[in-house]
Amino acid sequence: MLDAHTRSGGTATASPRATASELVVPVPLPPLPPAAVPVTAPPSAGFAARCTRALLSPWARFSLLIALLAAAASSVLLFEPQRLLSDGWPPHLGGVAAASVFAVAYGLCTVAFVPRPLLNLAAGALFGSQLGIGAALAGTVLGAGLAFGLGRILGQDALRPLLRGRLLRAADGQLSRHGLRSMLAARLFPGVPFWAANYCAAVSRMGWLPFLAATALGSIPNTAAYVVAGASASSPTSPLFLASMAAIGLPAAVGAVVAWRKRHHLRRR
């Protein structure tokens, strides 16, 4: 309340309470964070994920393996590699370079189901005994490794659940537990197709090293016999040619005996 001096024009003094209220400065509060909005993936992302899972499924990979093998077999029928026996190797290659290219072509042809005896005869006819044996063995190991890798990556997951029969389980156990010994016997026995042994081993749990080692060692006698026969085919009555023919027939007889005994052993299990 103002006194008389104030009413008459004097200086008025404010009370302490009024002065304190005038010095209060409002502090702005920070803005509230926006409410969390759930993020939903677009429909295209879910469709792409389902397509990816379908393409990577075991049966999709197995279908890809079948398509690749069918394409390889068709290309062999078109290009006819057996003409090497009559036409020979291209003239601009020779020596080790020609044998190296032949080894690569040998491996690819075995994946495409070309019979190895035909390729071994061609190696002997083109390069002679020594260089031909080296090229044929290198191509054998290369082709076996390619087939084993394709079967292991593209076919094993789809085919292993189908191993339900007694004989199939017994063969799978034999290859998985005694890989080196079993594959060595399969390579020494000429009656087992090369491609069949490759893909059966790929479906089993056999390791890479036993498979390749058994292939390299077990393929030496049969490969060398066919290569020598191809190199000496121009003189079929020579002792070298006759010895090679005997070397081809002897492993076949031994392999037949071993297969007969193994068959009875598997039946008793």
Image (tube, rainbow, N blue to C red):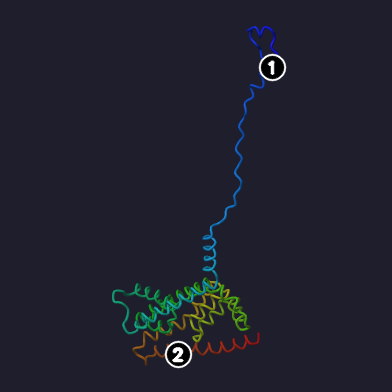
The residue to which callout 1 is attached is: 16
Task: Name the residue type under label 1.
Answer: Pro
Residue 182 found in image quarter: bottom right
Residue 170 found in image quarter: bottom right
Label 1 and label 2: CA atoms lie apart by 127 Å
Q: Where is residue 191 in the image (x, y as percent from the top left)?
A: 50, 87
Using the rendered image of the protein, determine whether residue 43 is visible from the camera's viewpoint: yes
Q: Position of residue 116 (x, y in %)?
A: 43, 82
Residue ID at (34%, 83%): 83
Q: Is residue 179 left or right of residue 125?
A: right
Q: Is residue 258 above or below residue 183?
A: below
Residue 104 found in image quarter: bottom left
Q: Position of residue 201 (x, y in %)?
A: 54, 77
Q: Earlier in the sequence, mark 1 or mark 2?
A: 1
- For the residue pair 34 and 161, the one nearer the viewer reads as 34
| Count of labels in the image | 2
Residue placed farthest to the front in the image? 7
- Quarter the N terminus occupies: top right
The residue to which callout 2 is attached is: 246
